[in-house]
Image (cartoon, rainbow, N blue to C red):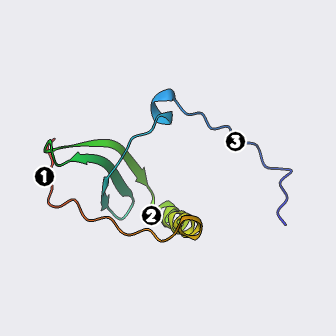
Amino acid sequence: MENNQNQKQLQIKVSDEILKGFYANAMQVMHSKEEFVLDFMNLSPVQGVGIVGSRVIMSPGHMKRVIAALQENMAKYEGGFGKVETAEEPGEMGFKG
């Protein structure tokens, strides 16, 4: 068992803007040797527009941990609520700067 007596409590602060969240129905992943870049987007095919609402940049080692955490939580979710079907891809997209 790990000795927790020497560990400090970490306080996490979240601004109101971040706390309200951003709905994403698409994600783009890019990477280099040093980092992964994840752009979370809200695409509106009806309006023909998409918005990148959040960009997360992390190391490859941390990305591996994120993938493992997501897989574990999806398994727990499906265990409680049933199998989730993969959503269809949104189709071809173009990006404006």
Q: Earlier in the sequence, mark 2 or mark 3?
A: 3
Element under label 2? helix
Q: Earlier in the sequence, mark 1 or mark 3?
A: 3
Q: Which mark is residue 10?
A: 3
Task: Work out whether residue 19 or residue 65 is closer to the camera in this orientation and state it.
Answer: 19
Element under label 1? loop
Residue at position x 17%, y 49% in the image: 45
**Disc 1 target residue:** 94
Q: Give how far across and how far down residue 16 sits, in percent.
A: 50, 28
Give the residue type that dot 2 points to. Pro
Pointer 2 with pointer 3, Cβ within 8 A: no
Q: Which mark is residue 43?
A: none
Look at the image and tell me in which quarter the N terminus lies.
bottom right
Mark 1 vs mark 2: in front: 1
Label 1 to label 3, Cα distance in Å? Answer: 41 Å
Label 2 to label 3, Cα distance in Å? Answer: 24 Å
User: Quick one: label 2, few (<14), some, or many (20+) residues within 10 Å?
Assistant: some
Left or right position of 94 against 36:
left
Task: Work out whether residue 47 or residue 50 is closer to the camera in this orientation and state it.
Answer: 47
Mark 2 vs mark 3: in front: 3
User: Quick one: label 1, few (<14), some, or many (20+) residues within 10 Å?
Assistant: few
Look at the image and tell me in which quarter the C terminus lies.
top left
Q: Give how far across and how far down residue 62 sits, in percent.
A: 51, 60
Give the residue type that dot 3 points to. Leu
Task: Work out whether residue 7 or residue 28 is closer to the camera in this orientation and state it.
Answer: 28
Q: Earlier in the sequence, mark 1 or mark 2?
A: 2
Residue at position x 57%, y 68% in the image: 72
Pointer 1 with pointer 2, Cβ within 8 A: no
